[in-house]
Image (cartoon, rainbow, N blue to C red):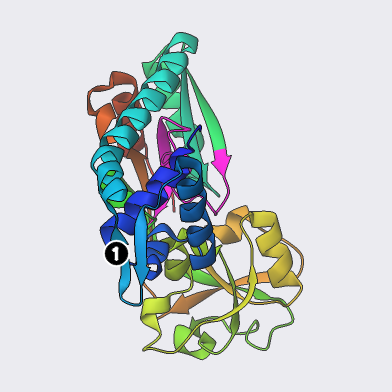
Amino acid sequence: MDVDTRLLRYFAAVAEEGTLTRAAERLFVSQPALTKSIRQLEAGLGVELFTRSRTGMALTEPGRALAERVPALLAGWETARRETRSAASRAARVLRVGFIASAANEATQPIVAEFARRRPGWRAEMRQAAWSDPSAGLGDSDVDVALVRLPFPAQDTLRVTVLFTEPRCVALPSAHALAAREVIPFRELWDEPFVAAPAETGPWREYWLAADERDGRPVRVGAVTEQPDDWLSAIANGYGIALAPASAARFYTRPGVVYRPVTGVSPSRVGVARAPADDANPVVQDFVRCCRETHIAT
C-alpha cells in the first residue's frame, strides 16, 4: 500500500491529541473527514491503530509502533521535498515567491526590482495563493519565500519578519445603510453577516472576522470565499460585509463595493516568511533583505 503523507499527519495528530475532536480542531478539518482518513489508513495497513471509547482514542500496540516512526518519516519526506524543489529552483535561477492578495502593496515591484539588481540572472517568480492557503505555499514547500499577512496557521514553525502594519477598514455594499458614514465603529458591525475565509484557515479566518474583538458576540457568516474576485462579488451582492486592509481600497475597487475606515479593531501586519532550513540560503536571505530595506508604502 502506498500511504499518503496526509494520512500519516492525521494519524500523528490523533495520536498526540488523544481525541478526534481536538485533532480535527488542530488540523482545521471536519471530524467526519478525519475519522474517514484514520479508517482508510487502518484498512490499508490491515491493523487497528486505535481503540475507541467515550473518553477518546488510545493507541493499540501496532499504533504505538507506527507513532514512534511517523515523526521521522514526515520530517524526512518534508526535507527531501524541500531540497528537491530548491535544487530545481537553483538550477533554473528562479526564486519562487508566494503571496497573498496585494502582497506588500506598492512595495512589491520595488522589492522584485531590488532582488534582480542584487542577484543578476535570477528571477523572482510571483505565485499568488488562495485565501485557503494563508502561508502562500510556504507550508507545503511550494515556494521558497512568501509575502504573508499575519496571523496564519503554523506561522510559529517558520521565520517571519514583520515589514509593516496598516489599519483595517470595512468593505460594504454601496447600498448598505452604513455606507454613507465616514468612519464606522466596529461594534456597530457585530450583528452584520460577514464574508469569511474557509474554516480550515483557522487563525487567519478568525482574525479577519475579528472574532476576538467582539466582547464575546458570535460571528454571523453570510458567505465563504477564497479568492478576491469572489470576495468582492459576495459583498457587492449583499451576502455580507468584510474587514480588509486599508490598502484594499486601492487594489480592489469594484462597482457596488465601498470601503470605510473602522475603529475598534487592531491593524493588519504584513511579513516575509521563510523556512528555518533556509537560514543559510543566501538567495532567500537576499530577498528578505530586499523586503526589509525597500521603502514600504501603506
Q: What x and y, as percent, mark residue 52?
A: 37, 67
Q: Is residue 285 left or right of residue 192?
A: left
Q: Is residue 197 visible?
A: yes
Residue 60 vertical position relative to residue 264 in the rendered view, above or below: above
Residue 221 vertical position relative to residue 291 in the rendered view, above or below: below
Residue at figure coordinates x 36%, y 18% from the top left: 118
Q: What x and y, as percent, mark residue 157?
A: 27, 46
User: Toward which corner of the image does residue 239 lie, by quadrant?
Assistant: bottom right
Q: Is residue 218 left or right of residue 212?
A: right
Instruction: Judge whether residue 139 is colored magenta.
Output: yes
User: Toward which corner of the image does residue 180 lie, by quadrant?
Assistant: bottom right
Secondary element at image label 1: loop
Residue at figure coordinates x 36%, y 78% from the top left: 212
Q: Is residue 159 visible?
A: no
Residue at figure coordinates x 46%, y 83% from the top left: 186
Viewer-proximal residue among 249 and 55: 55
Residue at figure coordinates x 39%, y 46% from the top left: 9
Q: What x and y, as percent, mark residue 48?
A: 40, 52
Q: What x and y, as percent, mark residue 160?
A: 29, 45
Q: Amino acid at mark 1?
A: Gly
Which residue is under mark 1?
A: 18
Q: Which residues are magenta?
A: 128-150
Residue 81 vertical position relative to residue 194 in the rendered view, above or below: above
The chief SS type of the magenta part is: loop
Q: Is residue 121 left or right of residue 18?
A: right
Instruction: Judge whether residue 272 is colored magenta.
Output: no
Specify few, some or many for label 1: CA neighbours under 10 Å numbering under 14, 14-19, or 20 or more.
some
